[in-house]
Image (spheres, rainbow, N blue to C red):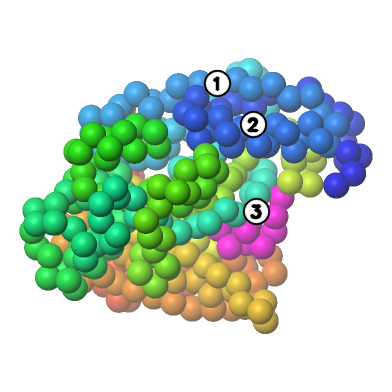
Amino acid sequence: MSPVTSTQPLHLTIATRESRLALWQAEHVKALLEGLGHTVTLLGMTTRGDQILDRTLSKVGGKGLFVKELETALEEGRADLAVHSLKDVPMLLPEGFALACVMEREDPRDAWVSPHCAGLADLPANAVVGTSSLRRLVLLREALARLGRTDVRIEPLRGNLDTRLRKLDDGQYQAIVLAAAGLKRLGLAARIRHIFEPTEMLPAAGQGALGIEIRSERADVAAALAPLAHMPTWLSVAAERAVSRAMGGSCSMPLAAFSQWDAAGLLTIRGAWGEESGTAALARAETGRVVTSLNEAEALGTHVADQLCAAGARRMAPDAAPAAV
């Protein structure tokens, strides 16, 4: 790619969490922007989500806890952009903020990580599986039920990626489920024993994609980011995020949404929703359309949300989303 862009070279500051994965992501964006002629520095920050490790995200305000401090840095002018794992970005951004760029997606699937067990069927009696996600909880519980494994416990797993792996290695869990993208980005693909196909475990909306947030009035930054955007990914995740938004907008819902392109240019999206309590069967939906714009992608996602509700899923009212602390 040529270093010439549609904007004059800018001096840009990227706000980022300080976990190893977040820093990798920020450094990746930094290198791409520098290749386009811009000067870039990083502003490392610790977010509320990084600090609260003794409770599940669904109990303390959802994944928006990972972005609030970064948004404050944007609002105060200490940073020009923030790089996020898109699945950590709330479905509704605060007024004055915009998702300016979605980059090409890494592997969107979930990964099974275990030192001794090749998969669910190999778990010993009374095993403990760790996950931080209500989505993974309901999908794992369904898979275990099919195997007749009522003895297996699914327990909360918090902390950054290295912390989660350490807890596994310390024997607190027999296996954990993580996003494959993070492991691959940090050179840890060898830790993966099995990658769940979407037919086995449907991914989260936006999983594996990087999103870049800016202040909505920063047209100069938006123009600088334009060469980094990958429209097939952006359209895919727009459809997925629209499912979640239509269901209530909470990142902490037991909801999966994943879309894929076929060779003919059709975007097919599947959704799944479960009760955290396990008192009802999973609701599932699937549909596909030709999609050429963000509006069309979002309309597709909204249609899938309607299908989920017709199958028994419950919408969460926006004011019923977990409150931040």
- The foreground one among 163 and 41 is 163
Q: Residues within 10 Å of mark 3 (few under 14, many from 20)?
A: some
Q: Residue at x 23, y 34 (%)?
A: 170
Above or below, 305 against 177 in this view is below
Q: Earlier in the sequence, mark 1 or mark 3?
A: 1
Q: Which residue is mark 3?
A: 104
Magenta span includes 230: yes
Kind of residue sitting beneath label 2 = Glu
The magenta span reads 229-238
Image quarter where the C terminus lies is top left
Kind of residue sitting beneath label 1 = Gly
- Circle 3/circle 2 CB separation < 8 Å: no
Q: Residues within 10 Å of mark 2 (few under 14, many from 20)?
A: some
* Quadrant hosting residue 309: bottom left
Q: Which residue is mark 1?
A: 44
Residue 186 x/y as whole percent: 52, 39
- The foreground one among 207 and 183 is 183
Q: Residues within 10 Å of mark 1 (few under 14, many from 20)?
A: some
Q: CA distance from mark 2 to mark 1?
A: 11 Å
Q: Earlier in the sequence, mark 2 or mark 1?
A: 2
